[in-house]
Image (cartoon, grey):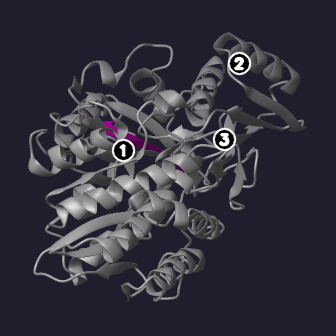
């Protein structure tokens, strides 16, 4: 029966997903209280609520912060928690990121796998259950709009709406996630005003477009050069430094007093920084080396190269913190220069048996050598851990394995999903085992086969958990 359902609804599901991807729902500041995350995020929400209504569900817009699509009766609620916002698209896409091009049986576009495709698969799974199965719970698809930033949407939901008794988030990997690492987002800053009269000084840094949870693929800076320095000599020194590190950094002479450096990397999700190349990190290493050749030592850069940067010096925090959920990972996601304040922002994914306080203590111990540097924790999220033999984990894992004809065990991840916002909730799909994780990457896509498979698995999960 479900095979016929998916076959009959395949084209409709694909078209609706394309239309949803075509809404560029990147977070934007808004003065409209009914659109707190911007007009495009609101359009994505209204699109899904309208579609849910047309498919025969109850819907609600929760003051523009989030919304939900629901069916069924009963005291308990089964929650499916996804999000409609996306990270910025970045450059160099093969196909436009908000066109939702289909090629080689894949739908390309920002949000295709994170998280619009899995959300659409969940909605059509709900439709199958609504029309064909008997459940004893209310089933609610909760739609967040601020997942890629600071989760204000889901905090607002929890303050104003009922939380599910059990649930899953279609925002990670199959077969099932039993643990998610803790997350720490700290910023390190200095007052740069005392360095502005140095022989070389920073005039401008441009990397504001990058999200903290994305490995930056491009970052540039403009340096002001004192007249006592021959700019051609400095450029030659820079070329040697860049060649020694084997970095991809372009040098532009703007005039006899200014040069511009543009560092190139490879974007990736901050939970998997090893899949990317960090443009900010490389730029800082080169700047620190260059400045020191002219007897200019910036404490923030010195701290970074000694204790944070891991690509060449081997001082990796990850070697000291590791458990069943994997190594600690670190992404340099932000570098800001405003009003003579220089800041570096990090995003860490911390193994489940290591406390956030322990990592902060490590930072503070290192910072004892740098009284000029200010430390600020901007955000943190505790780890999620549910034992592998828990009913929810076991049930979802068994459903996936039955459909995939596999014998896989549940896994731990570095990503953060809405599952950790609720009790008795885990993340479940839709990325397939062995498949490259395209979240936050250029040319993000979901294969049509993956989309349809996820719909089938989610339908069976709803039927089973809704009993």
Crowd class of label 2 (few under 14; some 14 to 19; many from 20; radius 10 Å): many
Which is nearer the N-term, disc 3 or disc 2?
Answer: 3
* Residue 152 visible in the picture: no
Circle nearer the viewer, 1 or 3: 1
Cα separation, mark 3 vs mark 2, equals 15 Å
Label 2 residue SS: helix
Which is nearer the N-term, disc 1 or disc 3?
Answer: 3
Q: Would residue 211 be found to the left or right of residue 94 on screen?
A: left
Cα separation, mark 1 vs mark 3, equals 24 Å
Q: Which residue is mark 3?
A: 219
Crowd class of label 1 (few under 14; some 14 to 19; many from 20; radius 10 Å): some
- Position of the C terminus by quadrant: bottom left
Please tell me the numbered disc located at residue 415: 1
Circle nearer the viewer, 1 or 2: 1
- Position of the N terminus by quadrant: bottom left
* Residue 459 visible in the picture: yes
Please tell me the numbered disc located at residue 242: 2
Residue 15 x %, y % = 63, 67
């Amino acid at each position: 029966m479900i095979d016929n359902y998916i076959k009959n609804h395949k084209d409709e599901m694909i078209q609706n997903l394309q239309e949803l991807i075509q809404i560029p729902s990147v977070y934007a500041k808004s003065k409209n209280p009914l659109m707190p995350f911007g007009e495009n995020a609101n359009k994505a929400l209204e699109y899904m609520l309208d579609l849910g209504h047309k498919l025969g569900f109850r819907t609600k817009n929760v003051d523009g912060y989030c919304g939900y699509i629901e069916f069924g009766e009963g005291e308990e609620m089964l929650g499916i928690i996804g999000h409609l916002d996306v990270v910025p698209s970045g450059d160099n896409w093969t196909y436009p990121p908000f066109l939702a091009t289909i090629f080689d049986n894949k739908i390309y576009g920002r949000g295709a796998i994170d998280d619009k495709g899995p959300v659409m698969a969940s909605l059509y799974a709900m439709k199958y259950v609504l029309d064909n199965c008997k459940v004893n719970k209310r089933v609610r698809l909760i739609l967040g709009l601020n997942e890629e930033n600071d989760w204000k949407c889901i905090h607002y939901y929890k303050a104003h709406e009922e939380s599910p008794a059990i649930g899953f988030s279609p925002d990670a990997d199959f077969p099932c996630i039993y643990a998610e690492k803790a997350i720490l987002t700290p910023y390190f800053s200095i007052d740069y005003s005392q360095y502005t009269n140095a022989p070389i000084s920073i005039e401008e840094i441009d990397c504001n477009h990058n999200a903290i949870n994305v490995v930056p693929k491009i970052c540039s800076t403009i340096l002001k050069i004192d007249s006592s320095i021959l700019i051609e000599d400095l450029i030659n020194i820079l070329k040697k430094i860049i060649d020694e590190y084997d970095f991809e950094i372009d040098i532009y002479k703007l005039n006899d007093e200014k040069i511009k450096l543009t560092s190139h990397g490879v974007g990736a999700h901050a939970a998997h920084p090893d899949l990317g190349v960090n443009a900010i990190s490389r730029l800082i290493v080169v700047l620190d080396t260059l400045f020191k050749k002219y007897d200019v030592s910036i404490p923030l850069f010195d701290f970074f190269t000694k204790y944070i940067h891991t690509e060449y010096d081997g001082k990796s925090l990850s070697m000291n913190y590791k458990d069943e959920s994997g190594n600690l990972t670190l992404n340099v996601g932000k570098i800001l220069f405003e009003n003579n304040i220089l800041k570096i922002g990090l995003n860490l994914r911390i193994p489940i048996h290591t406390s956030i306080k322990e990592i902060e203590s490590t930072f503070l111990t290192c910072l004892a050598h740098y009284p000029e540097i200010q430390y600020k924790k901007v955000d943190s999220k505790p780890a999620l851990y549910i034992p592998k033999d828990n009913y929810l984990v076991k049930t979802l894992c068994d459903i996936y394995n039955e459909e995939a004809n596999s014998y896989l065990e549940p896994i731990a991840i570095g990503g953060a999903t809405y599952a950790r916002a609720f009790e008795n909730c885990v993340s479940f799909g839709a990325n397939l085992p062995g498949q490259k994780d395209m979240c936050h990457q250029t040319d993000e896509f979901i294969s049509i086969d993956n989309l349809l498979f996820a719909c089938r698995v989610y339908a069976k999960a709803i039927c089973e958990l809704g009993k």
